[in-house]
Amino acid sequence: MVKQRKILLTVTVLYTLLVLYFMFFAFGRGETSDNISRYTFIFMPENFISLPSPADLLHPSLMSMVGFGNTIAFIPFGILIPWLYRVSFVRFITLFFIAILVLETIQAFTFLGSFDINDALQNSIGAALGFGAYKLGFRYRSLGRNLVATAISGMVLFIALWGLGAAVDKIITKVEGPFVAITEWTDNSGHLSTGDKPDSIQINGQKIPLRYNLYGAEGGDSRTFTYKSEGQTIFSFHYGNPEPTDYSGDIRATLDGREILNYSGEVQRTNPDLFPGLSEIPLEPGDELKITIEGDMKAWDVGYTRMQYIWN
């Protein structure tokens, strides 16, 4: 037992040094620290677990693998420490989380990284998985059977946590709802328009099918339409000068008085590849969007999708 304990202690110390190396010195941290002039502290967690989805694994990137590394690399601590010392889960995870917060703080103050609460949570989740795997696996007299059972338990717990995290993340993340076409729109003169509804229009020799509506300025005048968002939405519309045209039209859009879109018929004449154009504008509750249409310019399939939770 004494010899086994010494081996375990040696393995724990060496693995700790390896993790500390990756936390403070790997990935060129020492070189990049010379170019950092301010501390970085991230206190708000991004989501429940921050593990990449199965779709991310089909096209892996460095960032998508960070969540896996931050979790998996700390699973051994949840196995080695309770193997060495009799400790309750609450005491273990509390002390472990505090230690990780201290290391994250040192990273930030030494410019060898940043304080990121997401990293601390992922590290602690990994340690908790290891602790659970140890408790489930070490139930036999044979060391070999204990290690195999612990490894299997760890994989099962990790997959279960991954699935739970993906489900919770999907539940708490807003997605685009169905498209809602604007069938009635009031302009700056108080004139209510339902828009024209032709089957298609011709732009740059291309037949453009229309699905919902078509808005423009009658008689080549100017009309300004206003939309005030009542929620988190994505407002969208297509635009262009339909044929036949002398390219005299233009379209402008402002968001709370700030111009975000300005295209003229002359742009269409000189850059036909840009038309028909598509504008997608994210809006927050209370944002006021104004779209001014002049001359032959038209806007069609005008509407919005509301950001909503999956259960809505």
Image (cartoon, rainbow, N blue to C red):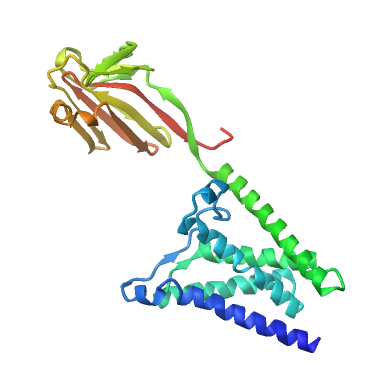
Quarter of the rendering containing residue 255: top left
Does 153 sit above or below residue 257? below
Give the quarter of the figure containing the C terminus.
Answer: top right
Locate residue 161 relative to residue 267 in the image: left or right: right
At x 37% / y 25%, what residue is drawn?
A: 303
Whole-percent x and y of residue 211?
38, 17
What residue is at 41 percent from the left and 78 percent from the top?
Answer: 110
Residue at image x 77%, y 88%? 3
Q: Is residue 190 visible?
A: no
- Is 253 or 189 nearer to us in this picture? 253
* Image x and y of residue 167, in percent: 62, 45
Residue 13 vs residue 194, the one in the foreground: 13
Residue sitting nearer the eye, 184 or 8: 8
The picture quadrant where one finds residue 267 is top left
Quadrant where the N terminus lies? bottom right
Where is residue 166 shown, x and y percent of the image? 60, 48
Q: Residue at x 75, y 72 (%)?
A: 88
At which x and y percent is residue 43? Answer: 48, 62
Judge from the rendering whether residue 2 lies leftward or rightward of residue 275; answer left or right: right
